[in-house]
Amino acid sequence: MSDLVDLRKLKNLIAVAEEGNITRAAKRLYLSQPALSAQMKDLEEAVQVSLLVRDRKGVRATPAAEILIAGGRHLLKLRDDLLATARAAYSVSFLSEARQQE
């Protein structure tokens, strides 16, 4: 996977797939529709496969996108867990230092 595939783009792909519509996903993500469309195009180019099937009803994820979406959800959860663990460790360290200074 290319360095061009970052968590933000995966998160945005998830939103597009959930909404089934790029305009609605863009509103949800507080992005312009052209900016989100460009990100999806960049993501498709980075992974070198089509991720979205576009039709007059909106968009739907391809099987390749479903794999990225599942992995992306997992990565986003890991990121959140990692940050929570780091914050908890900092809090414990901070409290220990404060008690030692008393």
Image (cartoon, grey):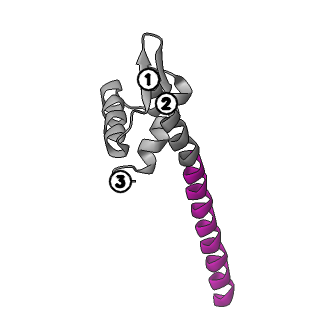
SS at mark 3 in the image:
loop
- Tell me which segment is drawn in magenta: 73-102
Asked which quadrant contains residue 98, the reply is: bottom right
Asked which quadrant contains residue 85, the reply is: bottom right
Mark 1 vs 2, N-terminal side: 1
Q: Which mark is residue 68?
A: none
Mark 3 vs 1, N-terminal side: 3
Query: Residue 90: image x %, image y %?
Result: 59, 73
Q: Find out whether the residues at labels 1 and 2 contact each other: C-beta distance under 8 Å.
A: yes
Which residue is label 1 attached to? 53
Which residue is label 3 attached to? 2
Asked which quadrant contains residue 84, the reply is: bottom right
Which residue is label 2 attached to? 62
- Give, as a three-letter code, the residue at label 2: Thr
Real-space Cα separation, disc 3 to disc 1, in angstroms = 22 Å
Magenta stretch, overall SS: helix
Query: Looking at the image, which residue is at 42% across and 10% down?
Result: 56
- Give, as a three-letter code, the residue at label 3: Ser
